[in-house]
């Protein structure tokens, strides 16, 4: 079934400082077609440069996050075609987005959907959600981070089990393993994710960006190197107007007004 006239990714701005991107291929369980990936990439590029956006909410809706790649577009593809698609370039704006990204996950986050969720900084999952890297069952393997990001998120033992068996894990098990930030009732996922975005959007954006950058850069660095990054990033923030405003507001017992300067 072809996609409807509605865009396959819907952009909205539910609150000040918050942009929401919703995957919109419900008839295909939000399978990640090239069209969807391209539009998602374009949105992330634009939002990264939008000074009014301080946090991004990524969701697939109330029933499913994303149930993997679009197999109909892969079955007859040859290796050169797969290589020349350069999907890593489409995913780079998501991976490299300087602003915090919160994923609201209901239902399936399978294959590419799981890989997409792992690009978020915070994952809020409904209790009925499940996560899976099932590529082995169709003769291939994860190709957009499902081996590398997964092992960094949940460790070797759980990543090997997920990738080699293709067996889904529950949201609860994903939470225990460290893949999911927070569990809640299915009907509360969007509201809870939006609450996280709202709180982040009220924080000083320069500090939020530095925190994200240092955590990600330091994950694979030796501790001493990562600590040096942290010290220098912290020192840089003392040059910001928001640092002065935040501390002054604390002393004056009032709410700060952060301007991102």
Image (cartoon, rainbow, N blue to C red):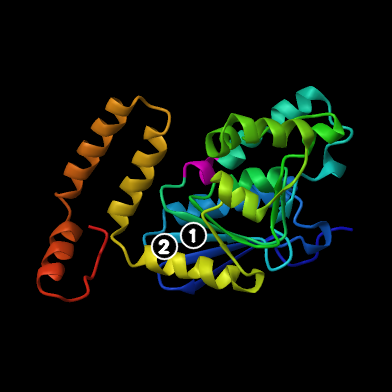
Between disc 1 and disc 2, the foreground one is 1
Q: Position of residue 9 (x, y in %)?
A: 66, 60
Q: Secondary structure at mark 1?
A: strand
Residues at circles 1 and 2 in contact by the CB criterion of under 8 Å: yes
Compared with residue 252, is residue 197 higher up or lower down, i.e. above or below? above
Does residue 41 show up?
Answer: no
Give the label on residue 3, or none: none
The residue drawn where x is 59% and y is 41% is: 91
Q: In the picture, which quadrant includes the C terminus? A: bottom left
Compared with residue 157, is residue 183 higher up or lower down, i.e. above or below? below
Depth check: give the residue in front, 60 or 90.
60
Compared with residue 26, is residue 95 higher up or lower down, i.e. above or below? above
Rendered image quadrant of residue 216: top left
Depth check: give the residue in front, 5 or 94.
94
Q: CA distance from mark 1 to mark 2?
A: 7 Å
Q: Which residue is mark 2?
A: 53
Instruction: Give the mark count.
Output: 2
Q: Secondary structure at mark 2?
A: loop
Depth check: give the residue in front, 126 or 78.
126
Q: Which residues are magenta?
A: 92-96
Give the label on residue 56, or none: 1
Magenta run includes residue 72: no
Compared with residue 23, is residue 225 higher up or lower down, i.e. above or below? above
Does residue 103 show up?
Answer: yes
The residue drawn where x is 20% and y is 60% is: 242
Q: Position of residue 92 (x, y in %)?
A: 54, 39
């Amino acid at each position: 079934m072809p996609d409807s006239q509605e865009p396959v990714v819907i952009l909205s701005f539910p609150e000040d400082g918050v942009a929401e991107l919703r995957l919109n291929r419900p008839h295909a369980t939000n399978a990640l077609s090239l069209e969807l990936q391209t539009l998602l990439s374009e949105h992330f590029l634009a939002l990264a440069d939008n000074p009014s956006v301080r946090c991004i909410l990524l969701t697939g809706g109330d029933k499913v996050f994303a149930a993997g790649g679009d197999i109909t577009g892969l079955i007859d593809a040859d290796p050169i075609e797969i290589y020349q698609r350069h999907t890593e370039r489409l995913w780079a704006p998501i991976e490299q987005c300087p602003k915090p990204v919160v994923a609201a996950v209901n239902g399936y986050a399978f294959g590419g959907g799981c890989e997409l969720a792992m690009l978020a900084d915070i994952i809020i999952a409904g209790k009925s959600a499940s996560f899976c890297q099932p590529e082995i069952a169709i003769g291939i393997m994860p190709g957009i981070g499902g081996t590398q990001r997964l092992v960094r998120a949940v460790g070797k033992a759980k990543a090997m089990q997920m990738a080699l068996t293709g067996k889904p894990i529950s949201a609860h098990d994903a939470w225990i393993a460290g893949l999911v930030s927070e569990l809640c009732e299915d009907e509360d996922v969007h509201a809870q994710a939006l609450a996280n975005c709202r709180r982040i959007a009220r924080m000083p954006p320069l500090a939020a960006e530095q925190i994200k950058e240092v955590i990600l850069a330091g994950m694979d660095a030796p501790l001493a190197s990562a600590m040096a990054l942290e010290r220098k990033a912290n020192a840089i923030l003392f040059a910001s107007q928001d640092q002065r405003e935040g501390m002054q507001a604390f002393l004056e017992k009032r709410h700060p007004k952060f301007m991102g300067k």
